[in-house]
Amino acid sequence: MSTKNKATRRRRSSSLMYTEPPESLEHKSDQKSLPNLNAEWVNAKGAGSIISSQIAETGAWTIHLVIIVCLKILYNIIPGVSQELSWTLTNLTYMVGSYIMFHYVRGVPFDFNSGAYDNLNMWEQIDNGAQYTPAKKFLLSVPIVLFLISTHYTQYDSLYFIINMCVTLAVVIPKLPVAHRLRINLRGEPPDTFEDT
């Protein structure tokens, strides 16, 4: 088979799921040369005293709880929305936003590191891809705790349970080490031919 046919032929084994290849030496050196401000906000370790950096780190984590409380208040003030539906909508909205922010969008939205992180989503950028760091443990526990709370307040109704469980699994599974650099390709194109947008 000629090389032209190999380049245009779609590989069946990678048509739905594929693993992002490891970074080249050039990308690794680009990543080490400048700080990744896109992912460093999660740890928010500033130059100052130990107490101020711990407060900043806690503040970066607290925003997730503030978002959940604001969503709950928003859905509570809508007339006709029951308590069960309010918790399910809070869970659903937070999980969709979390998935988009941490797992769907790839790269860095700002052009300050010359595309060094274009192949990685934010979850893979946090703590340089190290698993089970304090930040990642917290970000993994928030969807699970929110699921448990929403399941309790929906009084274990089967419909709400299924909805809450599905959206929680859709957010928790990509955070696990087995899903590191694993991509789901729903476009039907091989990963090599994705156009840069």
Image (cartoon, helix red, strand yellow):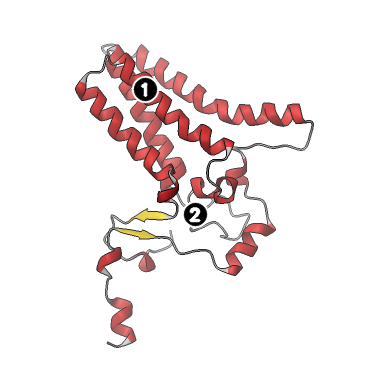
Identify the disc placed on residue 120.
Answer: 2
Q: Residue at x 20, y 22 (%)?
A: 158
Foreground residue among 118 and 152: 152
Q: Is residue 17 left or right of residue 130?
A: left
Dot 1, how many residues are within 10 Å of its Cα: few (below 14), some (14-19), or many (20+)? Answer: some
Screen quadrant of the N terminus: bottom left
Looking at the picture, which amino acid does disc 2 mark? Leu
Dot 2, how many residues are within 10 Å of its Cα: few (below 14), some (14-19), or many (20+)? Answer: many
Q: CA distance from mark 2 to mark 1?
A: 30 Å
Q: Which residue is mark 1?
A: 148
Foreground residue among 144 and 189: 144
Residue 34 horizontal/vertical position (percent) = 68, 55
Screen quadrant of the C terminus: bottom left
Relative to 162, residue 108 above or below: below
Q: Secondary structure at mark 2?
A: loop
Relative to 178, residue 55 above or below: above
Residue 17 horizontal/vertical position (percent) = 32, 58
Q: Please tell me in which quadrant of the rendered image residue 190 appears.
A: bottom left
